[in-house]
Image (cartoon, grey):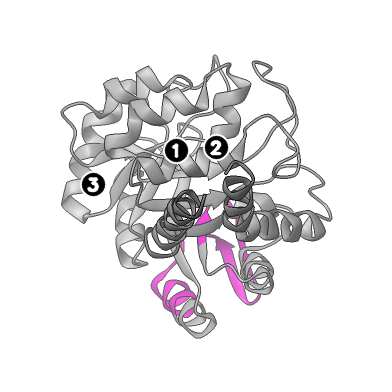
Amino acid sequence: MRQQLFIACFFFIALSSSAQKDWQLAIQTWTFHKYSFLESVDKADSLGVRDLEVYPGQKVGGEIPGVFSFTLDKDARDKLKQYLHDKKIRVVALGVIDKYYYNKDNLEKFFEFAKYMNIPFITAEPEWEDLDEFNRLAAKYKVKVALHCHPKPSSHYWHPDSTVKAMQGRKNIGAWPDIGHWARNGVDIQQALIKVKNKLWGLHLKDVEAFDNVKASDVLFGKGICDIPSVFIQLQQMRFKGVLSMEYEANEDNNMEDMRYNKNFVDSLLRQLLHKLQLKQ
């Protein structure tokens, strides 16, 4: 019994160490799309989250006109960089950039903007014919592209097999799926993670109420069918190193209490896993 408990504790310590060292907990600011980017920063700060994935249509707010995108002039960009530095908040990804945001005339401007703002990733859903150009620009600007997914049938990457195919031969393109959308699409999350594990750079952390139902609503973490504890164990076993970007699309007008619950759920999950391991001994 003592040896089994030691093994369980060793596994937990390894999992905790991996999560603290290699996993970046972030918030996708679409969670706060009813608010400005600056308000989102304040909300993340109050939750104790230091990293953000910012969608390119979000109004900046405050005295800075415009949205968080390449359309910002140098003065606005520099003010934002200073603001983020002072707040000790990092933007780790820009996206999701899809056909509703980019075209052949402005695509490179997104990469230039990400480079200027020190944003390491662009999360995107490129059209099939644009994958090589995304890969080329990623190399040019040293900003990696991570493929996202939305519900079928509109998303090219709703199934992990499509993501794997798109990544092949394109070293600057990886994966950044949404586990909630995978569940909505009828995709087994555990198996999907294994398929993309070699280039899994991040994911949207989410929980939904039903499997294989594209209209399934978001629910509080741990209240749905995504089995986040098992996802965490799977990520640890895969030696995942990347971003866990929390996204919550319910109660949009007043979701801070829910997001505090979700953040606390993630913070306490490792302790819960240890308890479960002890119960099995």
Residue occupying the point 43% across, 72% down:
77
Compare residues 252 and 193 and report the one nearer the observer. 193
Rendered image quadrant of residue 47: bottom right
SS for dot 1: helix
SS for dot 3: helix
- Determine whether 31 is above or below 222 in the image: below
In the rendered image, residue 152, in percent from the top left (x then y), is placed at 56, 17
In the rendered image, residue 37, in percent from the top left (x then y), is placed at 61, 64
Circle 3 Cα neighbour tier, 10 Å, few/some/many (<14 / 14–19 / ≥20): many
Horizontal arrangement in the rendering, residue 103 relative to residue 226 (left or right): left
- Determine whether 135 is above or below 269 in the image: above
Q: In the orientation shown, which residue stands out farthest toward the front? A: 1
Question: Number of labelled discs?
Answer: 3
Specify whether residue 65 is painted magenta: yes
Alpha carbon distance from label 2 to label 1: 6 Å
Alpha carbon distance from label 3 to label 2: 32 Å
Q: Are marks 2 and 1 in contact (CB under 8 Å)?
A: yes
Compare residues 248 and 41 and report the one nearer the observer. 248
Residue corresponding to mark 2: 230
The amino acid type found where label 2 is placed reads Ser
Magenta range: 52-81
Name the N-terminal-most of marks 1 and 3.
Answer: 3
Residue corresponding to mark 3: 138
Circle 1 Cα neighbour tier, 10 Å, few/some/many (<14 / 14–19 / ≥20): some
Horizontal arrangement in the rendering, residue 257 relative to residue 32 (left or right): right
Q: Which mark is residue 234?
A: 1
Q: In the orientation shown, which residue stands out farthest toward the bottom? A: 86
- Determine whether 28 is above or below 64 in the image: above
The amino acid type found where label 3 is placed reads Ala
Q: Are marks 3 and 2 in contact (CB under 8 Å)?
A: no
